[in-house]
Amino acid sequence: MPIEQRGVDTIPEEERTSGPRDLMSILLGSNLCLGVIVFGWLPPSFGLGLWPSVTAIVTGTLVGIAFTAPLALVSLRTGTNLSTSSGAQFGVRGRLVGSVVGLLLSLGYTALTLWIGGDVMVGALSRLTGLPDTGLSRAVMYGVLAACTVVAAVFGYRLLLRMSKVLSIGMVLLLAVGVFAYAPDFTSAAPPDTAYLLGSFWPTWLLAAVAAGLSGPVAFITLLGDYTRYISPRRHSSRKVLWSTGLGLLIGLLIPQLFGTYTALAARAGAEYAGPLVDAAPFWYLVPLLVAAGAGSVGNAGLMLYSMGLDLDAIVPKATRTTATVIAAVVATAFVFVGSFEWDVQAAMTSFVLLLTAIGTPWAVITLIGYVRCRGHYDAEALQVFNRRAKGGVYWFRGGWNIPATLSWAVGAGVGLLAVTTPFYEGPLLALTGGVDCSFVLSGLTGGLVYAALTARTAPAPAAEAVEEPVAA
């Protein structure tokens, strides 16, 4: 299989051969990994039992999908990734806002996947073979997983799609077997000695809905375009792509996260997940757990790293996608080492997802407002001006920046950061929200309203001729 040569340039029509089923395969197969499963552990670690954990995850996921899934339609129309596509609103240079947001999101989730996957693999090998569970053995495992991930990401979309199709079947079977493996120890009560993280039920439940449920779909706000740019709008309707995105996210996120909740309660995993998960596993399930940790981590981190390479390629146009991917992998692996040996996993995860959600949400809202205004009609050539180190075009605005959009994003992100609550930091606006983290809602509303107000009298930039929608079957 040849290495993919495409970066963030526009995918030609003849190469856009994927369809909605491929999109669902990617969203299912790539999410069936410990890097997503571990988010199901967060609600029990916050002090919630089974049903409060389930309702928080399901509610947050549904809200997140309703907000995130329409972004898939942007790249369906532009033929390039979402960060580059956002140049229609932010300007061909201002789209760097999206590239940086996407890079940070992918960096964090790649590091988390390698971290959790590596810890579980070392723990399983320790029980199976007597391998010492030390910092050195974990470091070697992180390196091995990172190397495999680089290979998958460098080969690109086609290899990742094939891997996802295999993982979507294999990982479902492994997790189904895991349900029986942990059944004897399952309890619906929160882990012992785990009080409500925020002192009472509802604030803690809302935190779980955002940190565990909402964060899953929001992680894809810049990723969805990496896959839908390979789908032709001439052969597949926007409605089918939208429904495939929503269903793929729903199934792909709920299966692993609810499995994470189930195993966290069975393993009495309070302050840590990986160690109790391995300790509670029956000996016969250690090999399946080892396979799930390795294959799932490479599949998920491979897609995240692939997206990181595209975002870094967009930030530094002179870099090739392959070079950008390798650089991104080195940085992500460095984060794994720092996180594993210096940070508390629960605090690090919670802080990361809440902060990035607050920063990324207003960017996504502004991009969606632009999509509605232009009715999905974009000038694909004008979006590539910055990548070609040229100037001009309908999205040039002022020096390549659309000041109203960039300012709106900055105001929305600022409000979100002032309203967030994490184990390390609490924003001053929490006094106005009763201590409840409303950063997602406030950042999105603020950014969207400011952008709508600043551009109310601005006509949308002229775009290329509309693409005819295929007739729905």
Image (cartoon, rainbow, N blue to C red):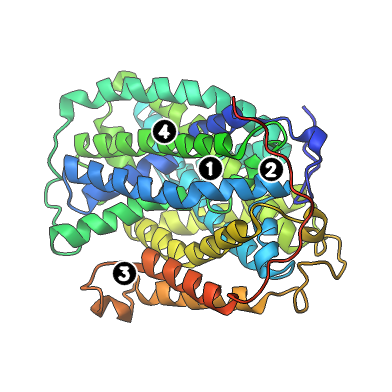
The crowding category of the residue bearing disc 1, from other C-alpha atoms within 10 Å (few below 14, some 14 to 19, many at least 20), is few
Residue 346 visible to the viewer: yes
**Residue 30 position in % (x across, y down):** 52, 35
Task: Report the Cα–Cα distance between label 3 and label 2.
Answer: 36 Å
The crowding category of the residue bearing disc 2, from other C-alpha atoms within 10 Å (few below 14, some 14 to 19, many at least 20), is many
Q: Is residue 455 above or below residue 286?
A: below
Please, what is the three-letter code of the amino acid marked with disc 1?
Val
The C terminus, quarter of image = top right
- Secondary element under disc 3, as helix, strand or loop, is loop
Q: Nearer the viewer, residue 397 or 320?
A: 397
Please, what is the three-letter code of the amino acid marked with disc 3?
Thr
The crowding category of the residue bearing disc 4, from other C-alpha atoms within 10 Å (few below 14, some 14 to 19, many at least 20), is some
- Secondary element under disc 2, as helix, strand or loop, is loop
Mark drawn on residue 251: 4
**Residue 343 position in % (x across, y down):** 38, 60
| Contact, mark 2 vs mark 1 (Cβ under 8 Å) | no
**Residue 249 position in % (x across, y down):** 46, 39
Closer to the chain start, of discs 2 and 1, is: 1
Quadrant of residue 96 within the rendered picture: bottom right
Quadrant of residue 228 within the rendered picture: top right
Closer to the chain start, of discs 4 and 3, is: 4
Mark drawn on residue 140: 1
